[in-house]
Amino acid sequence: MTKLKGILLTEGMHGMISQVEGLAKALDIDFTHHKVELNHIWKFIPPNLSPISQNVFKKINHDNFDVIISCGRKSVIPSIHLKNTANKKIFNIHIQDPKVDLNHFDFIVAPEHDSIIGKNVLNTKGAIHYLTESMINENKDYLNSFIKKDYRKILTLIIGGPTKYYDYSNENIKQIFSSLNELIKKNNFQLVIIPSIRTPKITIQFAKEYFENNHTIIEKVDKKAYLSALAISSHIVVTCDSSSMISEAALTGKPIYIANILPKKNDKRFKKFRNLFRNLNIVRNLSEGIKIWHYEKLDETNRVAKIIKQKINS
């Protein structure tokens, strides 16, 4: 059977790419990715006030396609326009709230904490993503040449970065490091620190100085190191600014701790997300101390992909 072809539309941000590519792979479609660029004044106009017209965005060169998967504000109008002007039935799927009439899309995939309701809305627990259990297992041994060869169990800290809600000041980061240091000493852990694209270089440098040579600090973004750390850790700590990385860690079924930072502004969406994961027994706060608990591994990407496949094939 010939595979369906898809085009993926995002603003080029890592979190968005992770979601659209993750869903495309779960749907088992051949795809090309396009970074959307808006024209002139339309860069500043929200989708609900923009016309559904080619004039809004720079032309997207594409071959024949069957599915559109979009994510982010800039991709809303292009997705609707490409569907409406196609000469055959096209399924378009938007990830996150498009902020327009939901009926422009065959499916909306949105996390529960966004509180979007509609007959074509697939609500997910957390963010969908590109990770799979096989990817994690295949990279299990990657960190063997990095970590200290001793009897200590591994605790991994996955660091995000500053956002409009959270400040990565020295004071805030020092508070996280201090809490971690107390836990790893008390429980005899080896700490592995994994940065993300958003992690400031100064934060990594501070970690090297703070924890010295007795632990493992990965200094640059390294996908294999990230996957390996998820595989070998007994406990995982994730900074509170990234619902995506918390959702990815939940694929492991391992205890996840949230390293909290005082918000600069109202972060009720993030709080709602973290409360949902806490009620699912997935996360606890770093301040609660090291414990062992279990929960069902969370794989929302494949769950929603099965629903979408049934619709496409019906």
Image: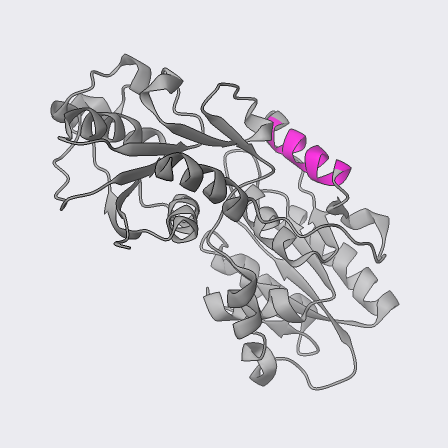
Where, by quadrant of the figure, is residue 263 drawn? Answer: top right
Pick the quarter of the image with the N terminus. Answer: bottom left
Lateral position of residue 295 relative to residue 88, left or right = right
Q: Assess whether residue 274 is covered by the magenta stretch.
A: yes
Which is nearer the eye, 156 or 121?
121
Which is nearer the eye, 103 or 291?
103
Colouring of the image: one colour
Q: Is residue 144 above or below residue 281?
A: below
Q: Assess whether residue 179 is covered by the magenta stretch.
A: no
Q: Residue 292 at x, y = what percent?
A: 84, 58
| Predominant SS of the magenta segment | helix
Picture residue at 78% right of the left edge, 55% below the top: 179
Q: Is residue 271 above or below residue 244?
A: above
Lateral position of residue 206 relative to residue 274, left or right = left
Q: Residue 34 at x, y = what percent?
A: 23, 45
Picture residue at 19% right of the left edge, 30% below the top: 82
Q: Residue 182 at x, y = what percent?
A: 82, 61
Q: Is residue 255 above or below residue 208?
A: above
For the magenta stretch, what is the residue range?
269-279
Lateral position of residue 35 relative to residue 282, left or right = left
Where, by quadrant of the figure, is residue 39 drawn? Answer: top left
Which is nearer the eye, 25 or 72?
25
Picture residue at 42% right of the left edge, 46% below the top: 23
Picture residue at 55% right of the left edge, 51% below the top: 160
Q: Is residue 242 visible?
A: no
Q: Is residue 116 visible?
A: yes
Pick the quarter of the image with the C terminus. Answer: top left
Q: Is residue 297 above or below residue 70?
A: below
